[in-house]
Image (cartoon, rainbow, N blue to C red):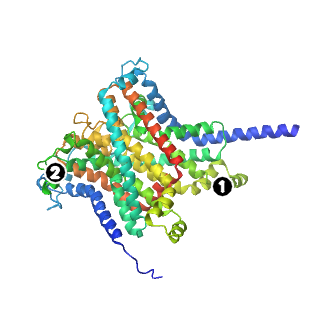
Amino acid sequence: MAKSSNTTSRSKALVRRETCSAYLFLLPNLVFFVGFVIIPMVLCVYTSFFDSTMGKDAKDIFIGLENYVNLWKDEIFLRSLKNTFIIVLVSVPVVCIFSLWVSSAIYNLKGSALSAFRCIFYLPVVTGSVAVTVVWKWMFNNYYGIFNYIGQAFGLIDKNINWLGDERFALWCIILILFTTSVGQPIVLYVSALGNVDTSLVEASQVDGANHFQLFWKIKWPLIMPTTLYILVITTINSFQCFALIQLLTSGGPNHSTDTVMYYIYYTAFKLYRYGYANAMGVVLAIFIAVLSAVQFKLAKEK
Amino acid sequence: MNSGVKRTSPYKVITLIILVILAILFAFPLYWIVTGAFKTAASINATTPDWFPKEWVMDNFNKLFSRQTAPLWELAIPFGSKFSADGNPIVFSAGPVVPASIRWLVNTVFMAVMAMVLTCITSAMAGYALAKKRFKGRTMLFTLIVCAMALPKQVILIPLLREMSSLSLYNTIWAVIFPTVGWPFGVFLMKQFSEGVPGEMLEAARIDGAGEAKTFVEIVVPMIKPGIGALAIFTFINSWNDYFMQLIMLSSTSRLTISLGIAKLQAENSTDFGLIMAGATLAAVPIIVVFVAFQKYFTQGIAMGAVKG
């Protein structure tokens, strides 16, 4: 009896010591995590219920769900939501299919050729969004851009087109640039996933007479499914958050044809100074992304 | 049998040709940036583009470097105004006066390296505690981390701005570094790696009388080194390219990062493409050199991060 109570008190002391040391290890990170991630997140949700402006002396007025109600009456918000969904729906499948095709073409090349290709497709990512965007802006330029030159030289267009200033083209130009900066990471991931496919499985199926098509769908595709899932999720999140391109190229114009939710949040907060309203949009965007990622996970799991 | 002879199907040849064309198209913007930076004004504004500069000139760089100037190095001590006698922020500055664009580069390197070092140290410690220690609140904390990770980072930037200005960190490089360090992906990644450290080794170290700190530094860190490398690469590139956060947090000319500086250059001289390309070259070339030098580790790190994450 005395012995067992002794062990419990000793193990309690041990538990306390372990808890103590665990929190000491966690502390440096928790300071940053709580201070600069959790607190702003809570503040974001909290302020979305207020009529709040950015000024220093401005008073926040509690308005309940009014910001959220107004969102669905705000035509620009609805337009930017539509544009965001167009970007996501076009770029996610295109990025996934393109990177899978490129990776399956290059993954069994010789070492140096493989790393050269992988490196080149990754270049736009490393170059950085601003440097990439300014050069595209030049290439799309009405007078000095090479797109107009090439188009005319090949007789595809009659006169110079103001690509970024034309409602019909601007969003597609953005999608094209976003595409070039989005495929780098998926290609790296697919190459490594395809390289990890067990060769004995592949050889066995070849002995059984499987053709290329069967080999891919029946053997490789299920094995690289986790990678596909990861790529789907990160590409979706990246496309939802498309911002630098819009801000530097079109500022949402012409006539809001390239407004995305992320850009409109920025615009509302820093140009219109409607702080609470911008936060309400942020919350809605976060919910969209969370739901979409959850759906993708679920679909992939069922398969 | 005759394994030395490789059969090349026409399909393979066509695929390879398409790949090479695609690779040229993907590399072209970078080529256009660098060549554009060395072209003459006449060549840049020609309606028929010069595919290769007819003459290489430094005009654009001279123009870029003759703009604003700033001291080479300046460091604001975080929360300095709380400690200084007159309530003003404490700022050290050093070095000769240089073109602002060089200063932007220095700022960017400082930001990315600082974010990388702080993230690696704090995340490795926290990840180890989450993986190997049993304590109250562990499950709750881990759930919180996973949930926070799924949310878009940009959403928290607006409240973060208010917080930073009330901490008087706004418009200092720390306002960009601290949120990056707090981002939970690093902890998550480090936890996944620390799971692989065998418990017996930790137990043995404890029996040998090693303290917590010694166990961590001498046993855990060497074992999770590949993970730390991957995290370092991730953080460095993400921090370097996190344009939105830099845009919101930094404002005065001498405190900009190179990305912001180029964006500002473009806003002020929207049609001087030569000047903008010179800026873009300055922004892109250093990180590309780093990337090409560490290419193997980069790609391994990215792949590893995904597998564990």
Residue B200, by quadrant, is: bottom right
Task: Give whichever of A261, B226 is nearer the camera.
Answer: A261
Tag 1 residue: B198
> Residue B55: image x %, image y %?
14, 61
Q: Which amino acid does label 2 sit on?
A: Asn
Identify the residue shown where x is 41% and y is 44%.
A236
Q: Nearer the viewer, residue A248 or B21?
A: B21
The chain ID associated with circle 1 is B
Q: Do labels 2 and 1 share a chain?
A: no
Q: Judge whether residue A112 can be spotted in this image.
A: yes
Element on which disc 2 rests: helix
Disc 2 crowd, CA 10 A, few/some/many (<14, 14-19, 20+) = many
Residue B182 in sight here: no
Disc 2: which residue: A148
Give how far across and how far down residue B261 sits, in percent: 28, 44
Return the mark for residue A13.
none
Farthest right residue in view: A1
Residue at 37% over, 39% down? B245
Mark nearer the viewer, 2 or 1: 2
Please name the amino acid that badge 1 sits on.
Pro
**Camera-side residue of A29 and A298:** A298
